[in-house]
Amino acid sequence: MRYSDAEDLAQLDARFAQMQALGCHDFALLFDDLPDRLPPLEVARFASFATAQCHVAHDCDGRRFYCGPSAGRPPKLRAEVRGLLANPNCELPLNDVRLRTLAEFARGGDPWDPRAAYP
């Protein structure tokens, strides 16, 4: 993907619209397999991969972090899976509430209230 290319961004938006039309309303855009450096045309616009990715995935802005309780999982999910995946922030202190409430969710208890799960 070329982060600064309007056509690439339009194709990505079109793909999201296509998935929404099929009923998928929650997305994660993961930048896993990255080359070791930005292409020269991208370097002219972005200082780093993180800056380029924030241009595409706005919830990854390093100045904003989601650090509220883990929420949105129905309690009956516990009986259907063998584990839960956590994707914590790089900054350890910001993970406290999210990881503690995820642990409480995994431990069990109904009804599940994520805001009450953190002491």
Image (tube, rainbow, N blue to C red):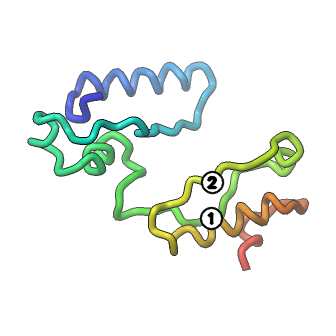
Q: Nearer the viewer, residue 74 or 87?
A: 87
Could you say where residue 43 lies in the image, as x and y percent from the top left? 13, 42
Q: Nearer the viewer, residue 33 or 85?
A: 33
Taking the image as shown, residue 15 lies to the left or right of residue 67, namely left
Q: Amino acid at mark 2?
A: Ala
Name the disc covering residue 83, or none: none
Please report contact status of discs 2 and 1: CB closer than 8 Å, yes or no. yes
Foreground disc of the pair 2, 1: 2
Circle 1 SS class: helix
Could you say where residue 60 lies in the image, as x and y percent from the top left? 40, 52
Q: CA distance from mark 2 to mark 1?
A: 9 Å
Figure quadrant of residue 15? top left
Could you say where residue 46 lies in the image, as x and y percent from the top left? 17, 46
Could you say where residue 41 lies in the image, as x and y percent from the top left? 11, 34
- Quadrant for the C terminus in the image: bottom right
Residue drawn where x is 46% and y is 37% of the image: 29
- Quadrant for the N terminus in the image: top left
Residue drawn where x is 78% and y is 60% of the image: 105
- Above or below, 104 against 73 in this view is below
Q: Earlier in the sequence, mark 2 or mark 1?
A: 2
Q: Amino acid at mark 1?
A: Arg
Name the disc covering residue 98, or none: 1
Circle 2 SS class: loop
According to the image, label 2 marks what residue? 86
Residue drawn where x is 45% and y is 68% of the image: 91
Query: For the residue carrying disc 1, how many other residues have a C-alpha within 10 Å: few (<14), some (14-19), or many (20+)?
Result: many
Taking the image as shown, residue 69 lies to the left or right of residue 5, namely right
Residue drawn where x is 32% and y is 44% of the image: 53
